[in-house]
Structures are given as C-alpha cells and as structure tokens.
Image (cartoon, rainbow, N blue to C red):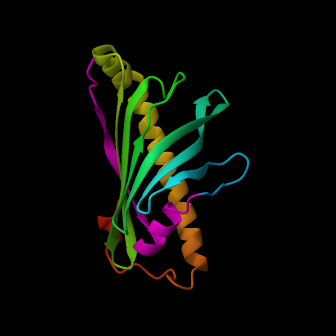
Amino acid sequence: MSLIPIQIPSETIHVNADRRLAFQVLTAFNASMGADGPSNRVLEDQGTRKFVEFTTPISLGFGMHKNWITTEWVDLHEPEAIDFNLVPGSGPITGGLKLLSDRFELEDHGSCTQFTYHSKFAIRWSVFGWMLGKIYIQKFMQKHMREHLSEVKIMIEARAERSRVHPQAACTHDLATAA
C-alpha cells in the first residue's frame, strides 16, 4: 500500500542569537539534557550525514509521559538547514509511522535568527492511516513542534548569552516581522 503524507503547518520563531550559533547548538549531538530531558547519540558519522538515535520525552496527557526513541538520518546544510528523516522501526509508534521528515531552516534576521520548523509524516494503512493521522496525530505533532521550538529557543538564547565567539547582540530588524 502507498503512503499518503500529511504536511503539518510550518512553525516559525525568532531567536535572539546568531544563526551560526543556533546551528551549532542544534547539531551538538551526543548530548543529554538530564534524566528527564531529551538526549541523542550518533550511531554512525558520515561527516555532514549522521545516523542518530534520539530519546524524546513525550507528554501523553493526564500526567503521563513516555520516552519516544527513534533513529533518524540527519543531513547538515551548515548553517542554513538540518534535515531529519525517520528510519521506521518496530513497536506501536515507529512501526506504524512509516514517514517522518522534519526540516529546520535558519535564516539571518539582522544579528538574530528566524527558525522555521517544517514536518510531514505518513502512517501505514494507506487511507485509514491518513484518516488516523489527520484526526489524531497531526494535532499531537503540531503541539510537539511548538513545545520543541520553545525549548530550543530557550536553549539557544541561553548559550548565546555565554558565547564569546557569537555573542548575543541586539537584533537589527523589526521584531513585528518576526514570528
């Protein structure tokens, strides 16, 4: 059966940090954010292409949390973009999720960065999978995207405050044009 991809509306945020620093923070692989935070480790390194295992805490609602472990090919296009492509696995989530393709785009905005998150996914079972994805999974993915962008923004800006190479500077563009 063929897959029917679902495009999630892109999310954009303004980050008060240099784009090069934002790229470095986003590609700091083999990192952990503590016992309850996300972590990742490079399983195979091919330079600008890496095979990475990600452990991502996911809120299931009603105070329940689960760690979602995925393996993904990550392609680096420094400093403009990062592409993430899920390698489907087994189990209830990655076994049914046959396509997950994310792209982070970083654009200079004065001395700051405009960060856009694009995502699309597909679930096996063709039309039934598409309906399940549109009704249930898309809203969950959009919420996860917003939360992830917020976390990443905080992390990048905190790093920019300490950077000597790419110090945080006042943005030189109109904030009303940034999302």
What are the residue bounds of the magenta stretch? 1-29
Q: Let me know if residue 17 appears in the view.
A: no
**Quadrant of the rendered structure where residue 2 is?**
top left
Q: Where residue 116 sits: x, y (%)?
A: 35, 56
**Quadrant of the rendered structure where residue 136 is?**
top left
Instruction: Please tell me which residue lies in front, 143 or 1.
Output: 1
Q: Is residue 11 magenta?
A: yes
* Picture residue at 55% right of the left edge, 45% below the top: 53
**Which image quarter is the N terminus in?**
top left
* Picture residue at 59% right of the left edge, 52% below the top: 41
* Picture residue at 66% right of the left edge, 48% below the top: 37
165 with respect to 97 (left or right): right
Q: Where residue 162 sits: x, y (%)?
A: 61, 78
Instruction: Please tell me which residue lies in front, 164 or 52.
Output: 52
Q: Is residue 117 magenta?
A: no
Q: Where residue 24 sits: x, y (%)?
A: 49, 69
Residue 158 drawn above or below residue 153: below
Query: As drawn, which residue projects farthest toward the right?
Result: 35
115 with respect to 38 (left or right): left
Instruction: Please tell me which residue lies in front, 87 or 143.
Output: 87
Q: Let me know if residue 105 appears in the view.
A: yes
Count of numbered badges drawn on the protein? 0
Q: Where residue 14 sits: x, y (%)?
A: 40, 64
Residue 148 drawn above or below residue 5: below
**Which image quarter is the C terminus in?**
bottom left
